Image (tube, rainbow, N blue to C red):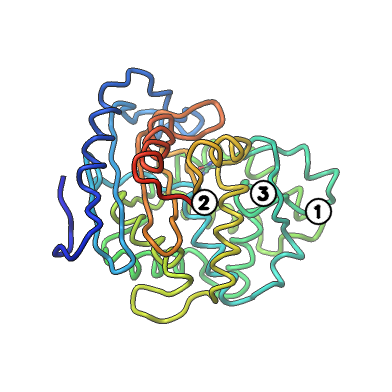
Amino acid sequence: MSRLAPHRSAPDFRPVLDRIAAEIDATPERGRPADYIPLLAEADPRRFGMAVAEPDGTVYGVGDWRRPFSAQSITKVFTLALVLSMDGERLWRRVGREPSGNPFNSLVQLEYENGVPRNPFINAGALVVTDRLQELTGDAVGRLREFMRAESGNAGLDFDPKVAASETAHGDRNAALAHFMASYGNITTPIPQLLDAYFRQCSIEASCADLALAAGFLARHGTRADGSALLSRSQAKQVNAVMLTCGTYDAAGDFAYRVGLPGKSGVGGGIIAVVPGHCTLCVWSPGLDRRGNSVAGVTALDRFTTLTGLSVF
Ligand code: GLN
């Protein structure tokens, strides 16, 4: 257990992180790593790491908190924030902000709802966001990487080409979603190029410390690590609201009940969570439940909010 920056005044999260790690270590049930992306299936479900970043960049961590893992859908928070910062409300004509109540890679709602995905965090919605970022910048994943490097302070943060290739080779469902939305005119980037960008985006390797720091703008009401504004205060609240209601897919209700924070999971086993004004968290353990959320990750966040009393409620 250690921290990155010199210690200042309280709160000191070390005792609570140590206690959570000990509890998780004693818990046999860990779920199973995602197996539809073959390279992720090799991860060890006993691994566990957790980091808490304060708004000034002080980071506390325990376990595998500095070990990089596949960020996957956690990156969808950053692409959404980048698009909102450049394009404001216009995005919401192309993607909704309602929980889907369906699995993250589901196709069924898209036809009933004319190619407009329910929210930016299911795969269909994230494809629309990446498409918009590509339209706005010409280099969606380059911008994403630049942003995550700057916010985390980790200049080596990068894509994992092997994970991207592994997902491309098994990417029929995401390809189907993209083609289907293109048939409604809701995707403009050529599909192979969009899928390439999306799979590279998902393949970003980052540690709990990196991701807790990169999400810091959500605890700082939209302000970046260098003090400049990414989002307005109101937009930062909106992103947190969409995370709370949609960030863990068809388990968002259960996550709000147990953890009580805006959160975003990825099938690499990571989850980020935000206590606005106080701190950001990232937890990692690769074993997933049937909805694609880390079993030990949700438990650890549940224990964190219970033990500290921190919550948005
Ligand atoms: N790359 C994964 C996919 O598109 C991301 C899913 C996730 O993390 N929930 O299926």
Tell me: is circle 2 under 8 Å from ligand 1. no
Nearest to the observer: residue 224 or residue 221: 221
* In-image side of 181 versus 247 (left or right): right
**What residue sits right under mark 3 in the picture?**
124
Q: Residue furthest top?
A: 28
State the separation of the CA atoms marked 3 and 2: 20 Å
Q: Where is residue 67 drawn, in percent x and y?
A: 24, 45
Which residue type does callout 3 highlight? Ala
Q: Residues within 10 Å of mark 3 (few under 14, many from 20)?
A: many
**Which residue is at 58% across, 77% downward?**
86
**What residue sits right under mark 2 in the picture?**
262
Query: Which comes before the other along the chain, label 3 or label 2?
Result: 3
Q: Where is residue 141 drawn, in percent x and y?
A: 48, 63
Query: Which comes before the other along the chain, label 1 or label 3?
Result: 3
Q: Are marks 1 and 3 in contact (CB under 8 Å)?
A: no
Q: Nearer the viewer, mark 2 or mark 1?
A: 2
**What residue sits right under mark 1 in the picture?**
183
- Give the quadrant of residue 110: top right
Nearest to the observer: residue 245 or residue 156: 245
For residue 290, the mark is: none
Which residue type does callout 1 highlight? Ser
